[in-house]
Image (cartoon, rainbow, N blue to C red):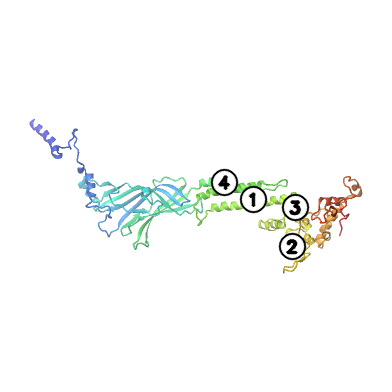
Amino acid sequence: MVFLTRYVIALLTVPLIIYGFDSNFTSDDTFVVSPTQVPLVRLTKDILNPDRYDTRVRPMKNHTTSLKIHISMSLYQIIEVNEPSQNIKMNVWMIQKWVDEMLDWDPHEYNMINTTILPHNVVWIPDTYLYNSVVMSRDETERYMNVRADTRYWQGKKGAEMSFLYPAIYTITCRLNIRYFPYDQQNCTLTISSWTNSKSALDYYGDEEVNLQSYIPNEEWDVISFRVYRHEYKYACCPEPWVILEASIVIRRKPLYYVVNLIIPTSIITIVAITGFFTPASTSDDRTEKINLGITTLLAMSILMLMVSDQMPTTSEFVPLIAWFYLSIIIIVSIGTFLTSIVLSIQGRRQYGRIPPLVVRYLFFVQFIKWVCLSVPPQLLKIWEELDDHPYDCWIRKRKGVKNGQLVETNGAARKRSVASEKRNSCTREEQKDMGETLISPAAEPDLLHPKRPSKRAMWLRASQRASTMRPTIEEKASLPMIDISTPTSPSSPDSGKSRRPSKISMWDNAMMLVGLGDRGMTVKKF
């Protein structure tokens, strides 16, 4: 019994002898080990001892050897593609790996610890930089945290393998080609390398493919490929080459949104506008609906083009095909609206009995019909032949200056023109009227009653014959009590106090010819 008691006392006193009788022994009878005795703490203090490790120096025992940096990337999300600014914003997870020859330990001395986590500011890290980043501050783009160190003791090598993992939100410049918008495909590149170390100090290499397993799909863009390429470039500043990693991402736009909101509405508006211009004209009133349709279409196309221009970069190197499409539709609708206004203007002249100018007739009935592969209606051609009033013939006579059957001299000599010859040979409004329904006043010019050209004589002969057939008999004249046939006086006669001759046959003269009398008692002379 005494032996057993002594044995128990010995077991209780051994820990007290080892760890002491001071503050290490608590009131709860719990033994606390000193922090300096924790293996992980001892490992951290030993490998980061300032006497053996300096964060300012590249961790290579042989300074002539290049340190290899392995970079791997994982695309997490495409946040935004800004077409006007020509940049792309994405969320990327970066992993950099290298060998730190200064961090070396034996796991047996530290309770078999093979891996430790160290803050990023207590170890050396490469100055890897994204060259084409829009944001220059690292604090706004990269979130540095910790670095993991794995010993290479079990591989029979010195040093530790460092793994630097951190998330980053990069905004890179990208030259966007939106020629085929919204069916475009863009290729953007992330240029990664050291800012101060050349190939002799840091040699970068990476995985060929970027990891897309954690990628969150974008609602507007599809990722076609994301590959990494290694290049060596020489700059003018330094004789040694720089190792550049270029991560090229190819994205394709999803066109469904733009097809529904731009392509289909534009096609419908275009079809309606062009079809509206080819609707038959009305003879009862003015078809101003065509002009209203053209103006409304121009307004709609302008709004749609404004929506497209907001998505496009302000560059003149390439213009999207859809912008050319909108511009062409605007031009076509503008031309159609302009021509419609001309047609309505010509149609409005009918109410006042005015024939369109010769230039308009020549452009519409001679030139324009050739451009659109049309022909003049046969009825209109027949009228032109009867009246010798074809726009082409009138235009040629006007251009050549035909006067009295001969060409006018163009050598600066005196040109004799008379009012009668101008009225007879320049296709004036009086000649362009339908002579079958227009009666000739005796007060007209004598030259007009005796034209020299056979075609003109035939025209006037037909008009006089028709007027004579329409002249009433004596009995019919007597049955007209409302007309005083004794002293008919025309407002345009010289008796009215004005000696000038009228330039236009009045309705009064036509009425007098209808009853067989004129202001001078003259009748139509037959040839």
The reply to whether callout 3 and callout 4 are in contact (CB within 8 Å) is no
Q: Which residue is mark 3?
A: 354
- The quarter of the picture where the N terminus appears is top left
Q: Which residue is mark 1?
A: 337
Q: Nearer the viewer, residue 424 or 372?
A: 424
Q: Is residue 474 left or right of residue 419?
A: right
Near mark 4 (Cα within 10 A), the count class, few <14, some 14-19 or many ≥20, is: some
Q: Nearer the viewer, residue 127 or 102?
A: 127
Q: Which residue is mark 4?
A: 265
* Residue 397 tag number: 2
For marks 3 and 2, the one nearer the N-term is 3
Q: CA distance from mark 1 to mark 4?
A: 20 Å
- Furthest toward the left, the residue is 2
For marks 4 and 2, the one nearer the N-term is 4
Q: CA distance from mark 2 to mark 1?
A: 32 Å
Q: Residue 125 in the image: state x and y as whole percent.
A: 30, 52
Q: CA distance from mark 3 to mark 2?
A: 21 Å
- Furthest toward the front, the residue is 497
For marks 1 and 4, the one nearer the N-term is 4
Near mark 1 (Cα within 10 A), the count class, few <14, some 14-19 or many ≥20, is: many
- The quarter of the picture where the C terminus appears is bottom right
Q: CA distance from mark 4 to mark 2?
A: 51 Å
Residue type, numbered disc 1: Thr
